[in-house]
Amino acid sequence: MKKLVLAAALTAAASTAFAGNMAEPVMEPVVVVEEQAASSSSAGLIVPLVLIAIAAAVANN
């Protein structure tokens, strides 16, 4: 019975030992980084040029 009381007392003491304090929480600043996609004038021409090349290769065979 003494061991049970001792275990209960130690458990109660350990649970309150890590309860924390009343200090204000410290908030880390949030940094937002926005990345813009690099636009290229030739980006819209690659796919049509490849399709025309494939069509020309098929037409020659």
Image (cartoon, helix red, strand yellow):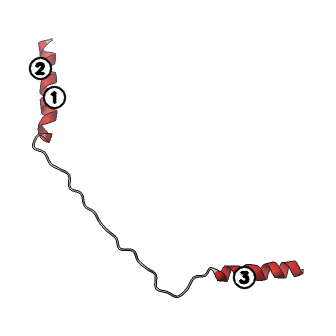
Is residue 15 rendered to the left or right of residue 21? right
Residue name at image x 20 percent, y 52 percent = 37
Is residue 61 rendered to the left or right of residue 6? left
Q: Quadrant of residue 11?
A: bottom right
32 and 55: which is toward the camera: 32
Residue name at image x 12 percent, y 16 percent = 59
Residue lying farthest to the bottom in this orientation: 22
Residue name at image x 11 percent, y 40 percent = 42
Instruction: List the residue tagged with mark 3.
Output: 12
Circles 1 and 3: CB distance less than 8 Å? Answer: no
N-term-proximal mark, 2 vs 1: 1
N-term-proximal mark, 2 vs 3: 3
Specify few, some or many for label 1: CA neighbours under 10 Å numbering under 14, 14-19, or 20 or more. few
Q: Position of residue 29 (x, y in %)?
A: 35, 74
Specify few, some or many for label 3: CA neighbours under 10 Å numbering under 14, 14-19, or 20 or more. few
Which three-letter amino acid code belongs to the residue tagged 2? Ala
Which three-letter amino acid code belongs to the residue tagged 1? Val
Please tell me the numbered disc located at residue 56.
2
